[in-house]
């Protein structure tokens, strides 16, 4: 997968590849225009798998994180009630 940026390929919508390219650029703090530089494009190409694995890990952990949050939202509500209505800190 090569990430050389071509200004003529923009057509008004964002494809999955364009979205991923935007994520890579954000992650590496570069502008998409900088991918015209072959050294930068080659670096992103050589290291994109690291970010892909990070993204996939977050996707896999998402349901578990949601379950944990759902379990503790009741605790948060109860604590808020105690603080507001009973003056307990």
Image (tube, rainbow, N blue to C red):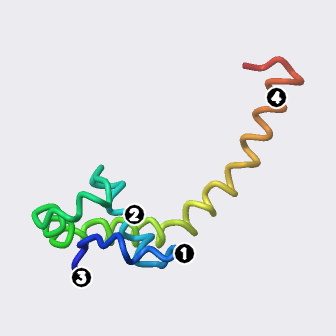
Q: Which residue is mark 3?
A: 1
Q: In the rendered structure, which disc, 4 or 1, sits on the residue that comes first in sequence?
A: 1
Q: Which residue is mark 2?
A: 22
CA separation in Å, label 3 and label 1: 20 Å
Residue at x 62% of width, y 61% of height: 66
CA separation in Å, label 2 and label 3: 15 Å
Are the residues tagged 4 and 2 within 8 Å (C-beta)?
no
CA separation in Å, label 4 and label 2: 45 Å
Residue at x 30% of width, y 73% of height: 6
Tell which tag, 2 or 1, sits nearer the viewer.
1
Q: In the rendered structure, which disc, 2 or 1, sits on the residue that comes first in sequence?
A: 1
Mark drawn on residue 28: none
Residue 70 point in image, percent of width and height: 69, 57
Residue at x 64% of width, y 54% of height: 69
Are the residues tagged 3 and 1 within 8 Å (C-beta)?
no
Image: 4 above or below 65: below
Q: Which residue is mark 1?
A: 13
């Amino acid at each position: 997968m090569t990430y050389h940026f071509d200004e003529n390929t923009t057509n008004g919508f964002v494809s999955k590849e364009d979205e991923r390219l935007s994520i890579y650029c954000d992650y590496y703090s570069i502008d998409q225009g900088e991918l015209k530089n072959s050294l930068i494009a080659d670096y992103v190409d050589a290291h994109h798998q690291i970010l892909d694995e990070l993204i996939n890990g977050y996707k896999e952990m998402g349901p578990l994180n949601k379950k944990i949050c759902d379990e503790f939202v009741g605790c948060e509500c109860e604590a808020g009630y105690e603080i507001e209505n009973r003056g307990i800190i």
